[in-house]
Image: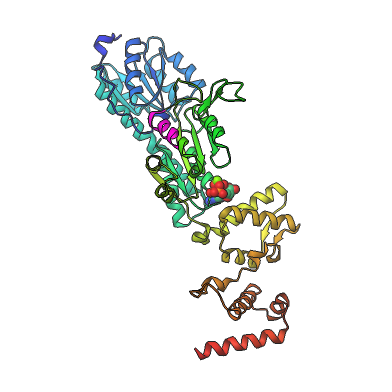
Amino acid sequence: MFNASTAVVLTRSLGHTPQIEGANFLNLLIVDDDRAIRESCQEVAQSLGFNTRVAESAEHAYRLLDTSTADAVLLDLRQPAAGGMEALHAIRKHRADALVIVVTGNGTVQSAVQAMKDGAYDYITKPFSMEELRLLLERVAGHLRLKTESRMLRESIKSRQGFGNLVGRAPEMEKLYRIIAKAGQSSHPVLILGESGTGKELVAKSIHLAGMFRGKPFIPVDCGSLVPTLIESELFGHVRGAFTGATNPKEGLLAIADGGTVFLDEIGELPVDLQAKLLRAIQEKEIRPVGSVKRVPINVRILAATNRDLERAVAEGTFRRDLFFRLNVLTLRLPALRERRQDIPLLVAHILERIGRDAGMEKTISDEALKALLRYDWPGNVRELENSLERACALSSAHQIQLRDLPTQIYSAPIELIGISTPANGIVPMAELEKQTILSALTQVNGDKMLAARLLGIGKTTLYRKLKEYESRSAAV
Ligand SMILES: Nc1ncnc2c1ncn2[C@@H]1O[C@H](COP(=O)(O)OP(=O)(O)OP(=O)(O)O)[C@@H](O)[C@H]1O
Ligand SMILES: [Mg+2]
């Protein structure tokens, strides 16, 4: 048996040790029968940011492993009752995903070698210094980060569609997936920018799921839809009597999310005084409930999103520069759907599969209808695509969605208009509009002039005449 004095040589000046990025989402279980060693190791691990639990015996460790998660286990191989090797095997068997680091005694290299052969991730020999333990835990944290990151990416490669719930294989999306996998492993705030309906909330959720926050709460807060006093008490909580109607104390979401993620949607709408309060909460990792003088520590990951131009809001003085910088550590810009049109068929298939599942009937789409979807400009992005398909399916009980089932703005999207250069005065001549409408109608009906004329509400001969005119005009150019 080791006694504490010979075991760990720890300096007590742990206060300045920088925390390991993301370690506050890693759970470390320390198994040692020596209380002094357990506590010293716990102190070092906590100073690095790890969440720790301690067990005084292998049996105690098994009980803890049954009820809580452990990403890594620091296991003293000298176990009084169950042998250390036996404990290693048991942990490896029941918690194959947890890294086990064995602690061996001086001069017992043999057992360290055996432990590594039996699946231990690493070993450390007693007595060890704080620096040695710190370096070891840093390696562990790095390894765990990489493990999760590559698992997420492997899964995304396996999935033909995209990454988690995100659909899309356009280069912009692939780049996004890589950043999400990385962002999941850090605890810095992330600012998610993108037009309405581009999937900002979905991306926030993916970051949450890609990280060590999985299993912890993901709490979205819509900063745009609540009145300022309500947002304040939602985020920070309040004490009884803090304001009229506050008959009961309430815990703030930033505290409730403990170890999880708070997603601040429409952050651009947050009132300026609350911006200051939020900045303080992020920096100091504590909050003060409304009406209280006490501060409450928080352990939460902040993700924020907006479709507003925050830089402009900063320039205009409606958004605090310091908060902007704080949130802007990592920024994700989601592409608009029209910038990744190649993903439209995948998205359509994905959405139709869901609708079909709900309706208990397979849903498909005709080539013409899909072509129209590919041409349309999608100001409302994926949400608009979803709504259009849902509407089309609601309108028709047939298996296949046809062009006519789509909303008019999509159905009659004048394709070539996209290519028209609007004159400086912003007015497109009637003749030009007419030409584009006719050509667009013809494309939509695959060149069927009879059908085009009928749909346009003009005579067949008028259509022929117009087409002749266009031909001769373009020949003259
Ligand atoms: N890449 C994607 N793959 C699959 N579905 C998506 C994707 N992007 C968005 N969606 C779907 O589109 C809808 C809108 O997404 P989401 O709410 O995340 O967008 P948003 O950017 O937060 O929009 P808003 O700014 O309007 O709040 C959701 O139903 C979401 O599931
Ligand atoms: Mg949203």
On screen, residue 36 above or below 303: above
Q: Which residues are magenta?
A: 275-285
- Would you say residue 305 sits in the magenta stretch? no
Front-lying residue, 105 or 358: 358
Residue 166 visible in the picture: no
**As drawn, is 458 to the left or to the right of 23?**
right
Residue 228 visible in the picture: yes
* SS assignment for the magenta stretch, majority: helix
- Residue 125, located in which quarter of the rendered image? top left
On screen, residue 343 above or below 299: below
Q: Position of residue 471 (x, y in %)?
A: 57, 87
Q: Position of residue 139 (x, y in %)?
A: 31, 32
On screen, residue 179 above or below 249: below
Who's the residue at 71% across and 87% down the image? 461
- Would you say residue 277 sits in the magenta stretch? yes
Front-lying residue, 436 or 45: 436
Q: Position of residue 302 (x, y in %)?
A: 45, 36
Q: Quadrant of the N terminus?
A: top left
